[in-house]
Amino acid sequence: MTQVVRAAIGAGLLVGMGGVPLLAQSLALPAADPVGIARSGAQVAYGYSLEAASANPALLSSLKEKGGFYLSGGLEMMAIQQSLESEQTTKQKVYQSTDRNRFLAGFGLAARLTPRLTLGLKLDQPYMRHAELPAGAPTRYLGESIDLGTHRLEGQASWAISPNMSAGIGLGVARLSYDASTLMRFNLINAVTDQVDGLVEQRVGESGHKVVPSYSLGFRWAISPRWTMGVTHQSGLKGDLSMTGGFVQGPLGYYAPDGLSAANAGLEAPAAALLAASRVNPGRPTLELPSQTTIGMRHRVSTLVTWEADLRWTSGNLQMPTYATVSTPNGLVVAPAELPRGKGYLGIHASTEIALGKLWTIRGGLALDQQSIEESGREPLLGGSRTSAFSFGAGLRVWGGELNLGYQFRQSEDQDSHQGDGTWSANGFSPRTVTRLRLEGMGHLMALGFKKTF
């Protein structure tokens, strides 16, 4: 019982550390199922777990039963807010993002064909990011919205090299989907005076999708009855999307040539004529998401308590498509900036699992990741500062299987930037590097699932 108390205290400390003041979560999700979410993704060495096999296919050979499946659904939620120091007078003005929720789905299946060979199938969502900035947000000209989604389906196979050692492979496909928009202003030139009468602000969007190959490799070594090591590599995902672009909704506003003052009346007709004569050109279609390599160690303290710690390297191969450009009768208009590229970083993930009798299992986890984007390139849509997360969950054996619930609170370090604000006049976009911009946010993952073994 002493071991249970110690483990509970340790799990409480992990949760407490996750609550320190730290922009919304990173692109990578720890898992798509409730068990993996509750473990904060720390499970590459966790034998006897069908959910853990979605992270490391070699673990399929460790399953006690001949087969099983799990099915889960949940929500991924994130929010971003930004505020300018120059607007913090008597009351702080905060711009909060919308488009916050996405459905999360996970599935896993395993079947032992021979004592040495076990086959599996998994469906997960390894990367996700979505947000839409409100009208008037300081950084709207650098990117106004993003919707990145991935759905990965892999067939898996695991070979038991010996009773204590196994290797696994997963081969499949991933569907990448991407939708983004930014705001641009277009000069309205008087045909008689050849002078700029004003500017029209318009949302410009683009979207695309692509099915690309994916693979995963895994290894498991049960060093002793209590210690197990796991190593896994998840491939990166890269493809040129089938991109389309266009104007989103109608004009958002009209401005004087200085970009700040109210425009004179009568600009609606020339603005409509200019936009009708313009063409939206999709940007560079390449989308690349990074690979992940993880090594983990699991320790079974007793029949009731198990913990695991993982060290994960995420490559720097992160690249978003470029924003669309617009060909107008007055020339080509481009976005003032593009989404930044990523950098490689390390992450530490840990989890604790406690069996309470024959019916209940409780889980807790913690994740700490280094910055994934250089500080000079950070902006709200991709984030990229140091991140932390804590999670918890529970499983109940019922209906001949196990009903599981998992929750993770995700956040990253607040960012201060001097590169987000600016004005767009008749001369184009001009950044105001003096004003300090504060970027904040948080995110949540939650899922409910059912597992059945046979």
Image: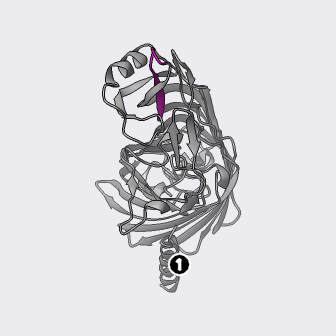
The residue type indicated by label 1 comes to: Gly
Main secondary structure of the magenta stretch = strand
Residue 380 point in image, percent of width and height? 51, 50
Residue 346 sits in quarter: bottom right
Q: Is residue 282 above or below residue 264?
A: above
Q: Left or right: 292 with respect to 353?
A: right
Q: How is the image coloured?
A: one colour
**256 is within the stretch colored magenta:** no
> Disc 1 on helix, strand or loop?
helix
Q: Is residue 226 left or right of residue 67?
A: right
Task: Residue 119 in the image: state x and y as whole percent.
Answer: 55, 38
Image point 40% across, 67% down: which residue? Answer: 89
Choose between 151 and 273: the one closer to the eye. Answer: 273
Which region of the structure is painted magenta? 180-193
Considering every residue shown, the one lying at the far bottom of the view is: 2
Q: Residue at x 71, y 63 (%)?
A: 223
Residue 129, given in percent of the width and then of the height, sits at: 48, 44
Furthest toward the front, the residue is 193
